Amino acid sequence: MTSHTINPAQPSTALSHLSTGSWVLDATTSSVEIKHKSMWGLATIKAAFTKLSGEGEIRPGGSAHGTLTIEAASIRSKQAKLDTHLRSADFFDVERYPTFTFTATGVVADGAGTAKVTGHLTVLGTTRPLAFTARATAAGPGDVTLSGEVAIDRNDFGMGWNKAGMIKGLTTVTLTTRFTLR
């Protein structure tokens, strides 16, 4: 798995400047989107998950941890037939695995407006380590947005359907998660 940082236009802040305590995901202003090459690399499939939940805690000193849960059946690509296929056992198998979860075991600010995020991603009942860099932006001490992008190999999670070799490369996951202090 590979990753890189997204640089939003908002000013950045170190997590150590935020209030300690419990935080909750604002699902209305957060997003998780995926894109993947298909049709032998000729087309890019794009979709977003519309139902997210999460929570976290910032400790004294600025380190943090938390959980992001995504309802697999909430995937929307603007193509009904594709959405049905993505929800099937060929891909997200939403009947058996209704959610997938990223558990951040560590979110550590680097002092430059970014944070190293480490944890575990669970998809289709398989858990793998995941690390990426997120850009931290804040509107105040009780509001922070973490944005990042990570490339994931869907085969790592047993998602091997690939009729006639039409699916190429890694899946890019783009996260914009806004948390507010409880």
Image: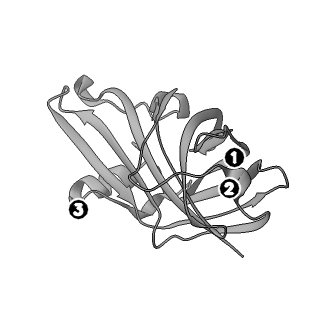
Q: Which amino acid does label 1 sit on?
A: Ala
Neighbour tally class for label 3: few under 14, some 14-19, many 20 plus, Cα within 10 Å: few
> Residue at label 2?
67
Determine the secondary structure under disc 3: helix
Q: Which residue lies furthest to the right in this view?
A: 60
Q: What residue type is labelled 3?
A: Ala
Q: Is 161 in front, or is 13? A: 13
> Residue at label 3?
80
Counting every numbered tag in the picture gives 3
* Gap in angstroms between the C-alphas marked 2 and 1: 6 Å
Neighbour tally class for label 1: few under 14, some 14-19, many 20 plus, Cα within 10 Å: many
Q: Position of residue 166 (x, y in %)?
A: 23, 28
Q: Specify whether 43 is left or right of 33.
A: left
Q: Specify whether 33 is left or right of 101.
A: left
Q: Where is residue 104 in the image (x, y as percent from the top left)?
A: 69, 46
| First in residue order: circle 2 vs circle 3 | 2
Residue occupying image coordinates x 26% and y 33%? 37
Residue occupying image coordinates x 54% and y 34%? 157
> Residue at label 1?
104
